[in-house]
Amino acid sequence: MAELGVNPSPETDALYDDIESGKHDPGTQSPNLLASQSPNPPTNLRASLPSPFQLLPQLDYFVGRESEADTLRQWLTQPNGPHFAALVGMGGIGKTTLANQIAHSLRTEFTDGVLWADAVAGEPFDILEGWGKAYGFDFSGLNDVENRAAAVRGMLADKQALIVIDDIFELSRIRPLLPNGEACAVLLTTRNLEIAVSLNAKVIQLETLSAENGRDLLGNIIGSQRVAGESEAADDIGSLLEYHPLALEICAQRLKSRRRRKLVDMAAQLRDVQNRLDLEISDRAVRTSFEVSWEGLDVRQQGVFSKLAVFESRPFASDAVAEITGQNRYKAEDTLDALHALSLVREEGDIHYRLHALLADFALEKLGTALGEVNGRMASYYQTYGQTNQINYDALSLEWPNISAGMRVAHKQENWPLVLTYGETMVEPWFAQARFADIQTGMAWVKEAAEATDDEATLAYFEMKWGQASIERNEYETAVLHLENSFERFQQLDNPARLAEIQFNLARVAIEQNEYEHALDLLMESKQIRQNLSDQKGVAAILYREARVWNAFGPDLNRAEQLAQEALVIQTELQDSYWQINSLRLLTEIEITRKNPEKGLHYSEQALEINTRLQNKGEQAAILYNLSSVYRQMAQFDKAIEVANESLEIFKQMGNLRFQGFLHYSMAMIYQNQNIFDNALLACKECINIFKALGDHTSTVYGLVLWGDCYQAIGQQATAVSKWEQAKEIAIGLTNATFVKMITSRLASVSTD
């Protein structure tokens, strides 16, 4: 079996049995420890034999699985049965290793021994005889499996033994090995969940190792210092192999035998699919462990499994599988459930399945030249899915990675009409759900498609959208570049409405870079176009943005409030939910500045109610940001921190650094109000780093002033003065007299003291 990969022939098995029973002896009959005439040797002979312990050696580099091991030990040793458990999982996931480790740890619990059977390499007929010999019985005279199984069951009836049956593929092969009664405990390992369920075993389905355990496994084999010296490369190796135990072990053993090989070079090698599947050492190989499962599939199952390669290791639903395989959904679900039972796919969430990354590599190898066709079906399916669920954000959230992958495939295949349709379908949902990185990537593909098809109008529109997304990620130079390119194209196309929209967005860039007068000029030009077009919705949006300028420029709060209220009246009449929320947020900010939190809370609650219908993630985060300041002014500090953290998490997902800076500033103020100065100082440092990176000098001044205030509060006057002086220098450069006066007052108070 070891050399040729096939089981011995029936003739060889029969010859083996004859030799063992003494029927075939070319020379003098050797003395037999066991009585050959009877299956029951003398009692004193059996009593002299030690309890059998038929396990593999323990691994000194075994890691993890503590929870699974504890559960299994409890199941196998509980006072009242059944003591019947199964480890289920994909090839190479570590079922055999864990079963062996558990059996070693339970040696003292099973005083009558531990028996082991390899269900693949061993024949039940021979295994049963070996178990009999282990207890001093000779069952060689029993020439059929049924009689030997009955004899072994009788032998084990009063014994407290642990039986481990490893790598079960066929239920019929191991039934003769199962004991009767509850004295013995049985631990099975199998890739087939249905086998374990049919035996009524308690099941643990093994998953991959955690990232931490993956690093530990590498460290235990090649040395922790070597891993620590290239920690990033070690993490890359674990991630590329998706923490598959066998693959990680083989990789580590290779590194161990190649002391000069750098981990970073191994990681680079593993980026190639072929190299990942080719991992092999001694008698262990990743591809071989998967081939065993592949050969157990029927033709239809093999066809479906190979096509799952197009999902790589992303979660996918049965509807998508039905589309790419040409089946109806029910047949697709049946096949997926069968593959899940065989540990080739795993269930994820309520409706999804997923391939392990290495199994996805293996499926891709099996799919071969059909990849392009199946990928095309996948790309078309997810475009249709996106179009069908354009405003169903819950449905879209389940498939964002697949939608992006579908568009990527369409681009790679140069299916330009499909790429453009993707862009038209997804641009608004992307903005609503604050998926600005997706927009930037998608717009690059759409731009290429529009250029390839000479579609100037589409090119101009999507370049404008690319610029808008760049604003949300605070990438102002990129934003201006795309907006100005779009402006030139729309000028040639004579599209005044789009020109006004671009000026409106350029004004936002100017506001966020503290160029308020330039922002007002752009807004006036945009407003003139909107009025000429009788575009009341556009005029209201410009009134809102003018109000935002005056809220910061001066500031002139009364003028800002007047403009915001004018905008809100028009937006309410037009039921323009998105811009209503923006105007309400600005009115909240004005009331916060006026230290009128109750009125600010009223505006924020109105905005939240509208956004419940709109489901705009970016606006949700911005409303929560305002609420944190409202709750701070109302001295509801726990609530203030809670909503600030919720808002911060959304802005991190969006990649919006500007608002992340604002939130750290807000949290610094909350902690300052509570006299929790360690937290306040850390939050100040975070916001300053962000504002400096963005070149936002006004916000940097605010942050430095607050930082100085916190240092003054804990008695570190010199450090406080240093922060205020930095703030004053920037304020002078901004020619902001209000800032300079505020900071000078602080510095004067310290010198007076």
Image (cartoon, rainbow, N blue to C red):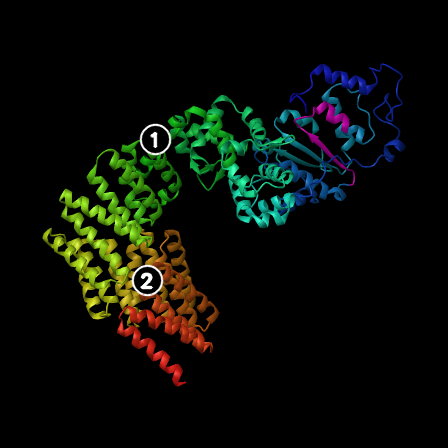
The local secondary structure at tag 2 comes to: loop
Q: Quadrant of residue 426?
A: top left
Please tell me which residue is depicted at 22% across the width and 43% down the height of the picture.
460
Q: Is residue 310 magenta?
A: no
Span of residues in magenta: 111-130
Please tell me which residue is depicted at 25% across the width and 37% down the height of the picture.
450
**Is 167 on the left-hand or right-hand side of 633?**
right
Disc ID at residue 696: 2
Q: Quadrant of the N terminus?
A: top right
Q: Amino acid at mark 1?
A: Gln
Measuring from the top left, give residue 122's x and y in whole percent. Answer: 69, 25
The mark total stands at: 2
| Residue pointed to by mark 1 | 413
Please name whichever residue, 493 or 649, is drawn nearer the observer in this view of the structure. Answer: 493
Q: Amino acid at mark 2?
A: Asp
**Is 28 on the left-hand or right-hand side of 275?**
right
